Image (cartoon, grey):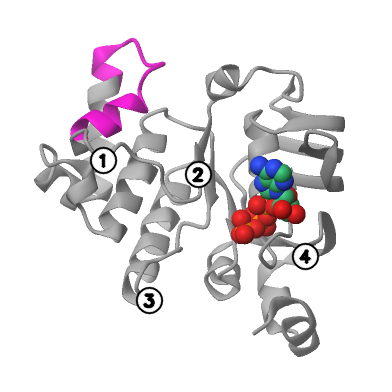
Amino acid sequence: MGLEINQLHAGYGKIEALHGISLEVADGDYVAVVGANGAGKSTLLKAISGTVRSFSGAISFDGSELTRMPPHQVPVCRIAHVPEGRQIFPRLSVFDNLMLGAWLVKDESVREQRLRLVYDLFPRLKERATQFAGTLSGGEQQMVAVGRALMLGPKLIMLDEPSQGLAPKLVNEMYEQLKEVHRLGTSVLLVEQNTTSALKYSTRAYVMERGKIILSGLSEELRDQDEIRRAYLGI
Ligand code: ATP
């Protein structure tokens, strides 16, 4: 089943920012949404999370309708959102930041098991567990944001520009870690301005422009077509 979006119109106040988006992330898929600044990528993730109002259209996940669901219910469906700019709590320890992601997990053994998984994926977070998260490097803070999302045990993880502000070497490291998250069974919906990385790691991709999807296909095929690269992807 997974995520199905059909003719979604959404926006801020009376201003529409998404003009009829249809998109699908099947179970186990790795989908990227690419497009320039202001295309509506962040708005799309926020509409799925319920923090931006949907005007019309449908968003369903594993059969549950999300458009009228209050934002705090969306994680109950096991959709995790890693927002733009990470939004971690700088004056809390790495451990406490991670535990905030497990607010829905009542069973302590499940929480411990997830924490072990996060520490296996990001050993640096284990080393720095007691440190204030605000004192970490940008790459490490991004790991905290992804780790916090994984503590929910998501079926779908949505990431908003995870490569933003990272040095090229760290961008690759981050994407290799996400590849492992995907390999372990989590579906991925990624929005990125960094088209090269997004198309390298995803299976399918959508290109957004001014609140609409103007192109979609297999990432490999989009990546390999010169005119598409030039006209739409800016590479
Ligand atoms: P970026 O990478 O810069 O975040 P984006 O593709 O994610 O770009 P959005 O942030 O989703 O784009 O913005 C889409 C449109 O919605 C833009 O026209 C933007 O000005 C508008 N918008 C975004 N946030 C708000 C807001 N809080 N209030 C009103 N309009 C907004």
Q: CA distance from mark 1 to mark 3?
A: 24 Å
Q: CA distance from mark 3 to mark 2?
A: 20 Å
Q: Is residue 37 above or below residue 105?
A: below
Q: CA distance from mark 4 to mark 3?
A: 26 Å
Q: Quadrant of the N terminus?
A: top right
Badge 4: few (under 14), some or many (20 or more) residues near its Cα, within 10 Å?
Answer: some
Q: Amino acid at mark 1?
A: Pro
Determine if the magenta segment contains residue 104. yes
Reading the chain from its start, which is encountered first: label 1 or label 3?
A: 1
Which label was assigned to residue 217?
4
Q: Which stretch is magenta? A: 95-110
Q: Nearer the viewer, mark 1 or mark 4?
A: 1
1 and 2 marks in contact (CB < 8 Å): no
Q: Is residue 231 above or below residue 157?
A: below
Q: Which residue is mark 1?
A: 90
Reading the chain from its start, which is encountered first: label 1 or label 2?
A: 2
Reading the chain from its start, which is encountered first: label 4 or label 2?
A: 2
Q: Which residue is mark 2?
A: 83
Q: Amino acid at mark 3?
A: Pro
Q: Which residue is mark 3?
A: 168
- Name which quarter of the figure residue 104 lies in: top left
Q: Is residue 54 above or below residue 211?
A: above
4 and 2 marks in contact (CB < 8 Å): no
Q: CA distance from mark 1 to mark 4?
A: 39 Å
Q: Quadrant of the C terminus?
A: bottom right
